[in-house]
Amino acid sequence: MLKLGKITIGVIIVCFVIGIGVGILMFAPFSPVAPFSPDYKIDQTGYPMPPTQKTDQPDHLVTAAGKQDYTLQVDGVERKFIAYRPTNLSDELKVPVVFMFHGSGGGGDLAYGETGWKAKADAEGLMVIFPTALKYYVGSVEQTSTNPAKKSRTTYQTKWNSYELPRVLDSQYPDQKLYDDVAFTRAMVEFVDEKYAVDTDRLYATGFSNGAGFTSRLALEMSDVFAAFAPTAAGALGRASSQIKTTLAADGIEVTPRPVIQIIGAVDPSLTNGAGVKAFPLDESAVSEGSPLKENYVNGFLDFEQLADEYTYSSTSDTVSFTYAQSLIADDNEYQLIIVDGLKHIYPNGKNFNFDVADIFWPFFEQYSL
């Protein structure tokens, strides 16, 4: 009979026990057990994962800086806009935001590349939003030097839903739906506030041509959101502002006067033709009683702003400026109208004309907050 020492027997027993344990682990179905630390979690394979590092998160989920394209569902359709935040800004720095509304037939990409606001954002440390309007069939009257007879023309182009849009829709397409661009703007503001660090007391709106008309609409309908407005090459309220305010009040929308600066070209044909003049005067007669600018621009904004009909006049070699700042409600509201010599129907960016309109609008904007 084979004799084994005590140590040998002990080794055999230990190996036997280990073998049984290995067999159980190999053939028994695996059932994950709770990890030793409550900071551990079980991943999809059943194995514990190391604890996640805990960090203090900023109040806002800051999306990637630079140029970002976004879409939102508003009023049953997909809406697009570009958000630009300079890459050198701290993710947690709350900055002002300018909303730039393009003209008829334009889009967010065009405004991003040609308005000068991207460069202004880089220079001043602010964000800029460049939204895109929806398309409509629009009827217009065309008249050229070679064919002086007026003829109707239909275009399918982007248009902001300004107060003027219903009037210019082509009657050959009677079932066109007017989409709610004010709701779209509010949705953009909410999105930007959620995704970026922004100063919601310093939001501003500017627009060109049809975008200027929409900017003027926002001055009435989103005065609770924007601190100041800057339409250019359009945006007349005329004498309709009182009627509009009455309609808005009936809908429960309170209008708060906010500062407005407006630039128009002395030889902008889209404005001079409608006024029946070849050019707007570059002197104080431009806003004299009964003049086209006084009737269509100044009076409407004085009513909206609740300002006295008294102005401060200034001029340069190529501009005249009228600043109405005597408030009837003891507020910091004001209206400034600038007429530029030689300026046609463009949004000046320093390349297509001898000044960049963003260089004028931004110093005006940054004076004001909600």
Image: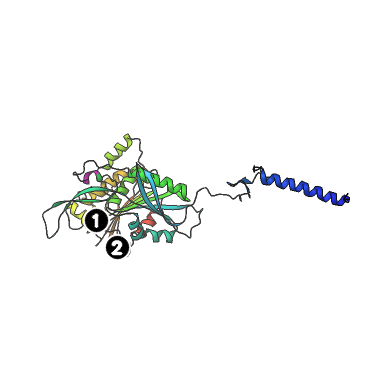
Identity, as a three-letter code, of the amino acid under mark 1: Glu
Residue 183 among magenta residues:
no
Q: Mark 2 vs mark 1: which is more N-terminal? A: 1
137 or 208, nearer to the observer = 137
180 or 10, nearer to the observer = 10
Residue interval drawn in magenta: 166-177
Residue 168 among magenta residues:
yes
In the rendered image, residue 254, in percent from the top left (x then y), is placed at 36, 38
Left or right: residue 233 versus residue 58 is: left
> How are the residues colored?
rainbow
In the rendered image, residue 135, in percent from the top left (x then y), is placed at 28, 49
Left or right: residue 186 versus residue 42 is: left
Q: Is residue 114 visible?
A: yes
In the rendered image, residue 251, in percent from the top left (x then y), is placed at 33, 35
265 or 130, nearer to the observer = 130
Q: Main secondary structure of the magenta part?
A: loop
Identity, as a three-letter code, of the amino acid under mark 2: Thr
83 or 265, nearer to the observer = 83
Circle 2 sits in a helix, a strand or a loop, which is it? Answer: loop
Residue receiving disc 1: 284
Residue receiving disc 2: 316
Q: Residues within 10 Å of mark 1 (few under 14, many from 20)?
A: few
Left or right: residue 54 versus residue 256 is: right
Identified at 34% across, 54% down, the residue is: 108
Circle 1 sits in a helix, a strand or a loop, which is it? Answer: helix
In the rendered image, residue 86, in percent from the top left (x then y), is placed at 45, 59
Q: Is residue 324 visible?
A: no
Identified at 69% across, 46% down, the residue is: 25
